[in-house]
Image (cartoon, rainbow, N blue to C red):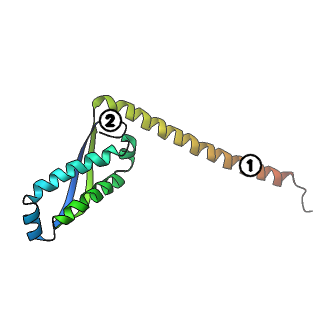
């Protein structure tokens, strides 16, 4: 659940390396099971700190938070988490249409801003050209 109380299903992949096999066997036993559970709780914690929009816009930063949250406990187990990838984020069907509408509105607003900036530049160039044409000739 995100900071704005919206549910999301997240598919993530964690890459890890066992650095100290004795430490991992004696401290945790089932390394894969422990990594799986830690990954699930780390994803929940990371998602709870951001809004759905932030999670969608910056998956890499979210993955970094997950990796950092996992690093402390896994160090004690003799395991190093090398990478976290967020593959997919799924939402309830009733959220898809509003999110799509919001994204479309944002893209249209950005295109209007770009168009307005281009119009301002064109107006400045036209004004400079008019000033040059209105000036007295050098002859």
Q: Which mark is residue 31?
A: none
Which SS class for mark 1? helix
Of the 4 image quadrants, the one containing the N terminus is top left
In this view, 10 is above or below 70: above
Residue 80 visible in image? no
Q: Earlier in the sequence, mark 2 or mark 1?
A: 2
Q: Quadrant of residue 115?
A: top right
Q: Residue at coordinates 16% horizontally, 50% vertically from top-left?
A: 37
Q: Quadrant of residue 13?
A: bottom left
Residue 104 visible in image? yes
Is 70 left, or right, of 122 in this rendering? Answer: left
Which SS class for mark 2? loop
Q: Horizontal and vertical percent for residue 24?
A: 11, 65
In this view, 102 is above or below 45: above
Q: Quadrant of residue 104?
A: top left
Frontmost residue, 131 versus 51: 51
Frontmost residue, 121 versus 138: 121
Find the residue positioned furthest to the right.
139
Q: Residue at coordinates 52% horizontally, 42% vertically from top-left?
A: 110
Q: Which mark is residue 6?
A: 2
Q: CA distance from mark 2 to mark 1?
A: 50 Å
Number of numbered tags placed on the structure image: 2
Q: Horizontal and vertical percent for residue 139?
A: 92, 62
Q: Residues within 10 Å of mark 1 (few under 14, many from 20)?
A: few
In this view, 37 is above or below 21: above
Contact (Cβ within 8 Å) of mark 2 with mark 1: no
Frontmost residue, 55 versus 73: 73
Q: Which residue is mark 1?
A: 126
Q: Residues within 10 Å of mark 2 (few under 14, many from 20)?
A: some
Q: Horizontal and vertical percent for residue 38?
A: 19, 53
Q: Residue at coordinates 31% horizontally, 45% vertically from top-left?
A: 47
Closer to the eye: label 2 or 1: 2
């Amino acid at each position: 659940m995100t900071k704005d109380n919206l549910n999301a299903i997240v598919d993530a992949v964690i890459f890890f390396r066992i650095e100290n096999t004795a430490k991992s066997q004696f401290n945790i036993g089932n390394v894969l099971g422990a990594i799986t559970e830690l990954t699930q709780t780390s994803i929940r914690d990371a998602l709870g700190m951001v809004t759905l929009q932030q999670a969608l816009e910056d998956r890499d930063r979210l993955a970094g938070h997950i990796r950092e949250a996992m690093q402390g406990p896994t160090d004690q187990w003799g395991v190093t988490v090398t990478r976290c990838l967020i593959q997919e984020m799924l939402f309830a069907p009733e959220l898809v249409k509003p999110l799509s509408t919001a994204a479309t509105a944002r893209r249209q607003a950005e295109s209007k801003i770009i168009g307005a900036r281009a119009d301002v530049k064109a107006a400045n160039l036209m004004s400079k050209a008019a000033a040059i044409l209105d000036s007295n000739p050098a002859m």
